Amino acid sequence: MADFEMRQISKKFGNVHALEKANFSANKGDIMGLLGENGAGKSTLVKVLCGVEKEDEGEVLLFGKKMLRRTPKEAMAEGVRVVHQELSLVSNATVSENLFMTEEEKPYRRKTIKELNKKAEALFKKFGVEDIDCTQYVRELPLAKCQKVEILKALAFEFDILVLDEATSALTEKDVEWLFELIRKLSKEGKIIIFISHRLQEINSICEQITIFRNGTSVCEAKKDELDTDQMVTLMLGRKIAGYYPEKAHSRKEEVLLHVENLRNGELTGVSFELHAGEILGIGGLSGQGQSELFEVLYGAKGAEGKIEIKGKECRLRSTASALKRGIALIPEDRGKQGLVLPMSVKENITLASLGKIRKGIFLSALKESQSVKKMIEKLQIKTDTPEVQVVTLSGGNQQKVVLAKQLLAEPDILLMYDITRGVDVGTKREMFNLMQEHCQEGKAILFFSTDTEELVHMCDSIYVMFEGRFKAHLQGDSMTEENIIRVSVGEAAV
Amino acid sequence: MRKRDYKRFIHITPDGKRTVVSFILLVLFLVVMYIVQPEIMKFSRIATITNGQLCLLLAGIGQTFVLLAGGIDLSIGGVICLSNSVAALYMPDSIPGMILMSILIVALGTGIGFFNGYIITRFNVQPFVVTFTVNYVLLGISLLILPIDGGNPPSRYVSALLHNFGQVSVSMIIVVLIVICWILIRRTRFVRNVYVVGCNEKAGFLNGIRVSQVKMLTFAISGGLAALAGLWRTAQLASGSPDAGDAMTMPSITISVIGGTSMAGGMGGAIGTIAGAYILRLIQDLLTFMGAKSFWSTVFQGVFLVVTVGVCSVIDMRKGGKKNG
Ligand SMILES: Nc1ncnc2c1ncn2[C@@H]1O[C@H](COP(=O)(O)OP(=O)(O)OP(=O)(O)O)[C@@H](O)[C@H]1O
Ligand SMILES: [Mg+2]
C-alpha cells in the first residue's frame, strides 16, 4: 500500500461527473505529476483533498490512516497544503499579513505588524526570495509575484503533502527554476509533492511519476521514463494530435493596420512599431517589462504620450469603449478579475463585448444570442453543461476559453493577446493557434504576448522583445530563436 | 437524455432563484394571513393594499436599479418629500396642466438623480456619502417651500389616481405595467450592463462598458421613480408633507433586499422588489391583527431581512457564485 491514497473518489455537480471513481496514490518523497485536459477533474480532486469540496463517495488515507478533512482548516492540520489554481490572496492586506493568515495557534491580528514582517523576512530568507517586499500591499503586486506569495504562503507551515495546482502558469522562467529547486529539496525531506501543469516540459523536467486523468478518472499511472511526450498527450486527450503547432500561414500583407510611434508614460519608455494586416506580431520578454502597460494603452485603458494611428488615421484612445469601436480588443492578464464576470452565466460572458451585434431594435435578441454562443462553444469546445451555468463553475482552462470566445465573437481587427494559453491543455492550445491563424487570414491582425518562447517562435511572423519599457530587439527570419528571445530578455544582445 | 433536456428547459438563473424565494415567502405570508383573515384575498382588499404600497414600491424599484449597479441611494426620501411638496402646492387644476406639472416633477427627480450620479462617478465619492448629503439638502428645500403639512392638490388629480375601473384600481394597473416594463427592459443592453457593473466593475470597463454612464443612469432612474412615488403620495394623502416621505428611504432598501436584490450588486431584480413591498405590508398587517405593539413590526422586519439575506447567500454559495474584488 502506498503512503498516500485517494480511493474511488466520486464527485458530482448537478449533471456533471467531475470525478468518477478516481484513484490516486503517491509515496513519501515522490514528485507526482498530475496531467489531464481542461475539465478532466484535477482541480476537483485537489479541492476534495483539501476539504473545500466534500466527495460523494470514496476515502483518503495518509500513512494508512483515514483523513477526515471536514474543513480546509482541518485538512491543513492533517498535513495538506495547497496552492490553488485561482489565486486566493486578500488584495487589501500586505504580503506578510497574507502569508500568515492561516496560522493555527494564535490569530494573526494579535501579532504586531513588526513581528509579522520579521517572520516573513525569515521565511523569505529560508527559501531564497529576494524580489518581494513583505510590507507591500498585494493589490500593488503583478500577477507573477502574487503567484509566488501564494506558494510561500503554503510553505510557511509544516505539511506532509504539498499540492501545486498550475502554480507555475503565471511564474517567470527564473521563478520556475527557483520553485523546482525547492521542490527537489522538499522531496528529499520526504514530503509528497503533487504537481499539476499543462506545460509538458515542466512535467518532464521535475516529475518522476505521473498520473493522467481523463473525464474524471485516472487512466494511467506510470514512471515518467516509461512514457514519451506524445504518448502522454494521447493518453490525456484520448486521441492523437497532429503536431503541437500549425504550419505558419504567412498571411502578412502590406497594409498597415496599426502604427505606433514613441509611446511613453511611467512604464513605457518609447515604443514604436507597425502591425500589418494578416500579421501575428510577437512580443517577448520577461513579464513585467511593460507589456501589460503597452496593451492597456493600446486598449484605451491607460493614457500615454505618443502617436497611435489606426488604418492610417491618427486617434486618441480615451476609453476602452472607443478602442473597441475602432476594432481593438484585449484579452487581459487576469481572467478572473479583468476578463470575466464570474457570477454571471457563460452565455452572458461570451456576448459581453458584442451586445451591439445581437441587438434587435432596442432589445437583445435571445435567439441571436444563443446561436452565437452555441457557435463559439462548439468552435472552442468549451466544456460546460449548459450555457446558462455560472462561469465560476467552469474549470480554469475552460474559463480561459470563454475569454477568448468573447473576444473572437466581437470580431476585432486588432486583437491584443496577453498570454492566452495560460492554463490551457495541449489539445486546446492547438485549437487556439488554428483560430489565431484563421483570424489573420481574414486580413485582421494579432499582437501576441506570451511567456512561452516556443509558442512565439512557432506562431509569429516576427518578434519584438521588450526590456525595461521599450522594444530592445526585432527578431525576424533566422534570428527568431528561443535562445535569442531569452538573451534579449535579460538584457544581452541577440546573436 | 430526455430528462436532461427537460432540465435545460426549466433552468432557472440565480437571479430567478432569488426572485422565486421572495415569492415563496409572499405566498407563505398570504396563507397565514388568509387563515386569520380570509378577506385578504378579496379584490378590493388587494386594491387597497396596492394603493397603500405603491409609493414605497416605486421608490423600491428605483433603489433596486441602484443596488444592482453596486450603489446605494439614500436621497430617495428627500426626492419624495420635494416632489410631494411641489405637487401639493402647485398642481394646477387643468388636465394639460396636471400632465405638464407631473412631467416637470419627474424631470426634476431625474435631474437630481443625475446630479448624484455625476458627483459620485466624476469625483469618485462613495454613493452613501453623496446621496446622504443630498437628502438633507432636499429636505431643507421642501421645508422652505412648504413649512408645515398642507397644500391642496386639485380633487380631480386625486380622484383620477385613486380611480377604480370596476374592481381594478389604477395602482394595480401600474403594478402590472411595471412588471411588463421590467420584463422588457431586462432584455436591453443597458440593464445587462447594469448587472455586469454590479458584479465586476473592472471587467465591465475592460469590455468597453461606459461604467460611469451606466451608474449615472441608475441614479437618474432612481430619482425619477422617487419623484413618481412623491406624485402618487400626493394623491393618496390629498395633501403634502415636507418631511414624512423621508421615512421611505430605509424601507425602499428593505423591500429590495427582501425581494432578493443583493446589496453588493449584480444580483436580483425588480420583480422580487414588488413581492418585497407586499411582504412588508403583510408583516405589518399581521402584527396589527395580533394586537402587537408597533415596535414589534420593526423588530420583525429586521429578523425577516436577516432570514432572506441568509437564504439568498446560501443559494449563492451552493452555486459557487462567490464574488470577486
Ligand atoms: N462548483 C462547480 N459546479 C459545477 N460544475 C463544476 C464545479 N466545479 C467544477 N465543475 C466541473 O467539473 C469538471 C472538472 O473541473 P476541474 O476544475 O476539476 O477541471 P481541471 O482538470 O482542473 O481543468 P483545468 O485544467 O481547466 O483547470 C468541469 O467540467 C467543471 O465544469
Ligand atoms: Mg484546474
Image: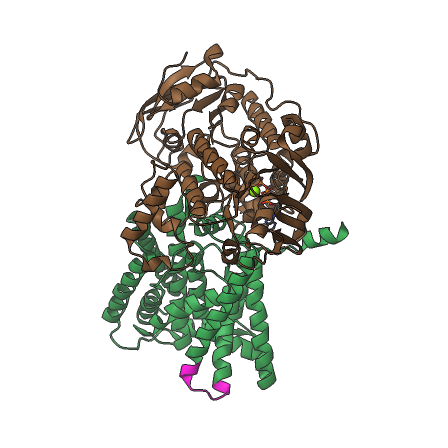
The answer to whether any part of residue A168 appears in the image is no
Residue A396 place in picture, x, y as percent: 55, 42
Say which of B275 and A384 sits in front. Answer: A384
Q: Residue at x 31, y 41 (%)?
A: A133
Which stretch is magenta? B288-296
Its colouring scheme is by chain
From the rendered image, report the letter of the chain displayed in brown. Answer: A
Q: Quadrant of residue B296?
A: bottom left
Q: Quadrant of residue B180?
A: bottom right
In-image side of A411 versus A132 (left or right): right
B291 inside magenta stretch: yes
Residue A399 place in picture, x, y as percent: 55, 41
A58 inside magenta stretch: no
From the rendered image, report the letter of the chain displayed in green. Answer: B
Q: Residue at x 55, y 15 (%)?
A: A250
Identify whether A297 is placed above or below B293.
above
In-image side of A316 versus A161 (left or right): left
Q: Residue at x 61, y 43 (%)?
A: A26
In-image side of A243 versus B108 (left or right): right
Say which of B26 and B38 sits in front. Answer: B26
Residue B98 place in picture, x, y as percent: 39, 65
